[in-house]
Amino acid sequence: MFNALNGLGGAGQLDPRTTSDANTSLYLAFAVCSILGGGLVNVAGVRYTTAAACLAYALYTGSYIYYNNTGYGAFTIAAGAVLGIGAGILWTAQGVIMVSYPSENEKGKFIALFFVIFNMGGLLGGVLPFAINYSRSGALTDSVYVLFVILECAGSVVALLLVPPTSVVRNDGSHATIRQSSSARQETLEVVKLFRNRWMLLLLPMSFSSNFFYGYCFSAYNGALFTLRTRGFNNLLYWSASILSSFALYLLLDYSRWTRRGRGVFSVAAIFITSNAVWACTLVVQLRYTRGGELTDYPGGQIDFLDHGRAAGPIALYFFMGMVDSWYQNICYWVIGTLTCDAFITARYIGFFKGVQSAGAAVAWQLVARNVPFMNQLVANWVLLLVSLPTMAYVVMHIEERALDDRLMYLSPRVNKSYVTDDSFVGLSGAAKRTPLGSII
């Protein structure tokens, strides 16, 4: 639902400045709380942290009802900061479930399944405003926001049904974690160690850029070029493309006849080609306008989807933006999933990833809020992509094949010794207890 609102450009508001400022406060809080989120989820568990975090989304969406009726954005900006706290925790918990619950040969499927469900929310969020605002223009009506709030509250209730990682047994008989619990002190120490972990540092560009492009795509492109109802229509296409491409990539990432390294290299190569092609086409469109909204200087003014001659190309391009977005997000999680199969370590890795990702998003949304020229935003996005792919490829090239063992969860390609704590093997029996530490480093 949150993606659906942002995808409309300014969350469906006439003046996107409030949404951009709210997104900045959101992602700043998100960045901090994500890094700490791994420890919080490990201590408090995925069930209650997720349920509580979902309510922050409802608060944020509800704040637009207040904004719609008063025109004051302070509450929405504050709600954005609250949402950042909740989102940092929720996305960490979600990452743990998505990456550490499945067995090694099912991770691509679980990642794709999540993004299909996730993007269905965006798809539904595109249908609602498109139908409600088909014959009108202006800001979204209160009824749209109320529907979103109801759906987000329902998500909080459903989250209470989640199974904790300590109770998860995979299809191959292995467990999602070898620990039963963790302490606040231990989690604090482990989070600090992330800042000198080789793999996390190499993935910094990937993490920073992975949500950076949303500011440009949602506001400088969709929000600037198209009429309100067409933005909703574009969302249908964007999230449909994300759903279809997630499924296609999962078939590759779980293709057992290829090595994990081979699957990873091919996926990164595909992202390099398609992403650069999309940004090149976007540059062609961007050269035709410098401002958006009703005062856009795009030839012919704002684009409506019924104006087929003018709309076909830009709308098709937005569809392909959704495709490469999905591929990039999927491969990010898959790469992190190759570093460990333990749920507790995954929580810290995902938290670090989401923290850096949110810092990048905060910068991107401030570029939108400060009216940085659209062309400068496009160039920044393209440069970040070109910087992130080589380091991602380097990590992928060092992926090693590791046979799953339900008693030994440290399956990382060269796990750093600093991440193996004294209690890592508590509760192990038989051969696992006798496995020398050096043999898995």
Image (tube, rainbow, N blue to C red):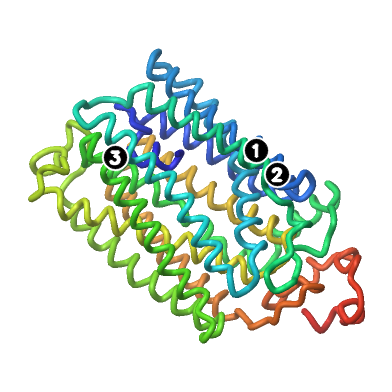
| Badge 2: residue crowd in 10 Å (few <14, some 14–19, many ≥20) | many
Label 3 Cα neighbours within 10 Å, binned few <14 / some 14-19 / many ≥20: many
Q: Which amino acid does label 3 sit on?
A: Gly
Residue 194 relative to residue 80: left or right:
right
- The residue under the point 56% across, 80% down is 260
Q: Earlier in the sequence, mark 2 or mark 3?
A: 2
Q: Mark 1 points at which residue?
A: 51
- Quadrant where the N terminus is found in the figure: top left
In this rendering, position of residue 226 left or right of residue 393: left
Give the structural element (helix, strand or loop) at label 2. helix
Report x, y in % for residue 53: 62, 37
The three-letter code of the residue at mark 1 reads Ala
- Residue 262, given in percent of the width and then of the height, sits at 50, 83
Q: Are marks 1 and 2 in contact (CB under 8 Å)?
A: yes
Up/down of 32 relative to 346, above or below: above
In the foreground, 437 or 431: 431
* Mark 1–mark 2 distance (CA, rounded to whole Å): 6 Å
Most foreground residue, 95 or 369: 95
Residue 50, quarter of the rendered image: top right
Q: Which mark is residue 47?
A: 2
Give the residue number, with chain letter if any, for mark 3: 232
